[in-house]
Each structure stands twice: as C-alpha cells, then as structure tokens.
Image (cartoon, helix red, strand yellow):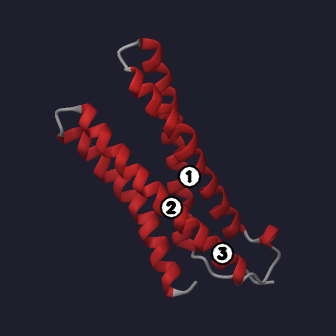
Amino acid sequence: MNPAERILLTLWIGGMWTVGYLVVPTLFQMLDSRLLAGAIAGRLFTILSYIGILSAVVLIAGQLFRATVPWKRNWRLGVLAVMLVILLIGQFGLQPQMAALKAQGLADPAIAARFGRLHGISSALFLVNSLLGLGLVIFGLKAEKA
C-alpha cells in the first residue's frame, strides 16, 4: 500500500468512526432540537458517503493495478467492493426514501415507523462498513501473494 492509499484509507475510515460514533451522538446529546441534530448528522453522513465512494473507487483501482492474484482471490478487493455497494445503497437507495418520509412529516405514526425501519437498516449498514473498514486498517491494503 502506497502512502497516498494509506492516507486515503485513514481519512475515510477514521472519518466514519469519528462522525458516526463521536460527533453524531454528541450532537444529539448537546442540541435541544433533535430535528437540528438530525439535519446536521444527515449532512455529515452525506459528505462522508461521497468521501467513501471516491476513496473506495481509488482504492479498488489500486488493488486491481497491483494485483498479483486473480481478483476473485483478493479478499481486500472484495471488502472494498462490499463497502462501496453498501455506500451506494445507503446514499442512493435509503437516504432518498428517508428524506421523502421526513418531508411528509414524521408526526404520522405509520410514516415515523417506516422512517425508523429505514434508519435502523441504514445504521446497521454503517456499522458493517465501519467494522469492515477497521479490518482494512488493521490488516492494510498490501498486495496479495500468488
């Protein structure tokens, strides 16, 4: 793994852990308005998603460029691909649905329940990605040996 890839991985995964597990809980704890805390958190997660998408694409390209084994046997490439798919599902699948539900108003219990389910799925996917990312940080992105 070259230094640029190491920095990119650190910024991406470090950002996930910082925003997801430190900043957002602090927002909800300190701000009186859950609506404001949610709006700020949503914006932070959107920024983080785009950083992740860009990072994943660059890191996948790096893995493919340095491949010494077939791509199907490169677990690091597989992890990056899964993380990218999760990001795309969250950003372009779940987030628009959640935004539409918020626009309808969460006072309706049925809408609030649907929003809660989508938020739960989104949170679970974020947890999976942050754990996969932690694995990449721990084991690095070194080239697989043939």
Q: Are marks 3 and 1 in contact (CB under 8 Å)?
A: no
Q: Which comes sooner in the sequence, label 2 or label 3? A: 2
Tell me if residue 46 comes above or below residue 8 in the rendering: above
Residue 88 appears at what percent x and percent y?
59, 50
- Tell me the CA gap for discs 2 and 3: 14 Å
- What number is the disc on residue 61? 3
Give the residue type at disc 1: Leu
Residue at x 42% of width, y 70% of height: 11
Tell me if residue 5 comes above or below residue 123 in the rendering: below
Q: Are marks 2 and 1 in contact (CB under 8 Å)?
A: yes
Assign the N terminus to one quadrant of the image.
bottom right
**Quarter of the rendering containing residue 62:** bottom right
Quickly name the residue at label 1: 87
Q: How many other residues sit within 10 Å of disc 1, few (<14), some (14-19) or many (≥20)? A: many
Q: Is residue 39 left or right of residue 32?
A: right
Residue at x 60% of width, y 45% of height: 89
Quickly name the residue at label 2: 52
Q: Is residue 76 left or right of residue 131?
A: right
Residue projecting furthest to the bottom: 2
- Tell me the CA gap for discs 3 and 1: 17 Å
Residue 103 appears at what percent x and percent y?
39, 26
Give the residue type at disc 2: Gly
Assign a secondary structure to mark 2. helix
Assign the C terminus to one quadrant of the image.
bottom right
Assign a secondary structure to mark 3. helix
Assign a secondary structure to mark 1. helix
Q: Nearer the viewer, residue 47 or 30?
A: 47
- Tell me the CA gap for discs 2 and 1: 7 Å
